[in-house]
């Protein structure tokens, strides 16, 4: 559907990059996406980079005695970066192809009373450490779940006010979309020069959202390739899978988010078929919900 070209700047990128092949949260980490982010490293479009991500609770949970009720929320949901993508300009779209997501040998899940959709069923805060072996998460002897690691938080610099990495919005952020995984691509609208990509909040596995606040939270390393699609005018994130496109809409209520995502998906389908479409807008939320609409478009694939 969208053709990307490799952007070659007139002069080499001079961004003071620390390591164009690998960047770690120890080099740089943000807890909000804003308009004035400063890069810790840089990459050229078409380049592949590995991004080492801290777990969502910032290594504050290391044993089952460590509870969500006791952690410092100012150091939660950090995103590694920002990574400048040289040549990215407002109006472009950044396409991040997820080539691999590798996770640590151990993750955790946590619950807390009155938190999440099923919080009213939780009597007390608890943490469960989950070992990962040979691609399987062992909750118990009888409950073993094949993992499917994905990126929970991924985004770029905003056009307006800074937004916490806790929340999703038009720039990306805490999308918690399990399809942002190996083999798929996420598209993000560029609002500031260089895009300023950042990502984190890795899950070993998660359902469609975090019903009880967490998936299997874990440290991990993401291998991705970034491309630019000049002048695309994308307004919100979208995800490309093997056989579908997903538009991601965020708003203060699920109904609003679903309406935005569905309208955007219609526009994606119309664009792929050369038909006219329009895109709704949404103001920044105080607390956002992310919804996705899916369009099955096997013939409308992105080309590199």
Image (cartoon, rainbow, N blue to C red):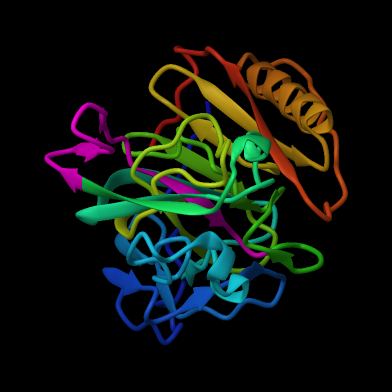
The C terminus lies in quadrant: top left
Residue 151: x, y in percent? 43, 48
Residue 236: x, y in percent? 69, 42
The quarter of the displayed image where residue 290 is located: top right
Residue at 81%, 67% (x, y): give it: 161
Closest to the observer, 205 or 3: 205
User: Residue 226 magenta-drawn?
Assistant: no
Q: Which residues are magenta?
A: 132-157
Residue 211: x, y in percent? 58, 36
On screen, residue 23 versus residue 73, left or right, reads left
Q: How many numbered badges does the structure rendering display?
A: 0
On screen, residue 256 versus residue 223, left or right, reads right
On screen, residue 153 versus residue 243, left or right, reads right
- Check the image and name the residue furthest to the left: 134
- Check the image and name the residue furthest to the bottom: 16
Closest to the observer, 88 or 49: 49
- Check the image and name the residue furthest to the front: 123
User: Residue 143 magenta-drawn?
Assistant: yes
Residue 137: x, y in percent? 25, 39
Residue at 41%, 58% (x, y): give it: 45
Residue 6 shows up from this direction: no
On screen, residue 229 versus residue 191, left or right, reads left
Above or below residue 59? Residue 155 is above
Residue 32 shows up from this direction: yes
Above or below residue 49? Residue 253 is above
The quarter of the displayed image where residue 106 is located: bottom left
Residue at 84%, 31% (x, y): give it: 256
Residue at 70%, 60% (x, y): give it: 191
Above or below residue 222? Residue 193 is below
């Amino acid at each position: 559907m969208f053709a990307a070209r490799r952007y070659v700047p007139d002069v080499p990128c001079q961004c003071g990059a620390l390591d164009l092949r690998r960047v770690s949260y120890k080099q740089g980490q943000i807890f909000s996406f804003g308009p004035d982010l400063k890069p810790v490293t840089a990459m050229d479009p078409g380049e592949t980079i590995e991004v080492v991500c801290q777990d969502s609770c910032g290594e504050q949970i290391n044993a089952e005695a460590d509870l969500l009720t006791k952690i410092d929320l100012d150091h939660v949901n950090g995103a590694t970066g920002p990574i400048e993508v040289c040549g990215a300009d407002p109006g472009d779209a950044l396409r991040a192809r997820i080539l691999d997501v590798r996770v640590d040998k151990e993750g955790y899940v946590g619950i807390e009373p009155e938190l999440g959709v099923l919080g009213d069923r939780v009597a007390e805060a608890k943490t469960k450490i989950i070992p990962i072996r040979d691609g399987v998460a062992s909750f118990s002897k009888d409950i073993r779940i094949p993992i499917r690691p994905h990126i929970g938080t991924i985004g770029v610099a905003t056009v307006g006010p800074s937004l916490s990495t806790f929340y999703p919005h038009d720039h990306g952020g805490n999308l918690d979309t399990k399809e942002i995984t190996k083999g798929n691509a996420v598209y993000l609208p560029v609002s500031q020069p260089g895009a300023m990509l950042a990502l984190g909040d890795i899950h070993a596995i998660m359902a469609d959202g975090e019903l009880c606040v967490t998936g299997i939270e874990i440290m991990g390393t993401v291998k991705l390739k970034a491309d630019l699609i000049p002048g695309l005018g994308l307004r919100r994130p979208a995800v490309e899978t093997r056989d579908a496109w997903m538009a991601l809409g965020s708003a203060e209520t699920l109904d609003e988010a679903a309406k935005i995502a569905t309208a955007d998906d219609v526009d994606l389908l119309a664009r792929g078929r050369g038909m006219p479409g329009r895109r709704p807008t949404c103001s920044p939320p105080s607390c956002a919900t992310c919804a996705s609409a899916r369009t099955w478009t096997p013939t409308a694939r992105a080309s590199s």
